[in-house]
Image: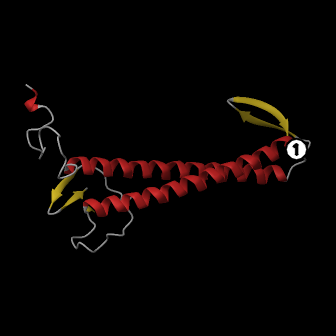
Amino acid sequence: MAANSSNTGSKTSSSGGGGKQSGPSAEQVVATFQRMRQEQRNMASKAAELEMDINEHSLVIDTLKEVDSSRKCFRLVGGVLVERTVKEVLPALENNKEQISKVIETINTQMQAKGRELTEYRERYNIRLVGEGEGEGQGQSAAPSGNSEGGGSKSGAGVLVS
């Protein structure tokens, strides 16, 4: 009946979870590690997107500083194009740019914390990335956000993540 469901690859005894003496399985370790790496990648992607927004804001701010402050300009607010003057729009753009910078700082702090968490997780479960080198001491402090993705396989005493 239920004997064939989700027991493949399991190393627990037939008493389905009374005590986890050996910890999570290799598949669970790899899945958690991949999820954590993806979270860090998503943060980096969001930070890059916000950096591009800051560059756009800077370009517009520099352009508007050179024109007359009473000149009409148009601004997209919540999907609606509104007519304002440069004098009204410029402070709002500068404020938005500052707010975006603060968000980027927060994301970078979170990415660093996630990087430390990933490193601790790698050390705890002896996770090695493909192409990292076969020596155990070699590359242990390497950045955990490698370019390769995919499943993993067991190798020796640790987990090899491709």
Residue for point 9% across, 43% down: 13
Rendered image quadrant of residue 157: bottom left
Q: Nearer the viewer, residue 146 or 7?
A: 7
The secondary element bearing badge 1 is classed as helix
Q: Which residue is mark 1?
A: 87
Which residue is at a point 22% across and 73% down the rendered structure image? 135
Q: Residue 42: where, in percent of width, then height?
A: 46, 47
Residue at x 21% of width, y 58% of height: 159
Please name the amino acid that badge 1 sits on: Lys
**Front position in the image: 148 or 42:** 42
On the rendered structure, is 87 left or right of 110?
right
Relative to residue 106, is residue 72 depicted above or below?
above
Tell me where residue 89 sits by quadrant: top right
Image side of residue 45 versus residue 152, left or right: right
Question: According to the image, what is the colour scheme of the structure?
Answer: secondary structure
Identified at 69% across, 49% down, the residue is 99
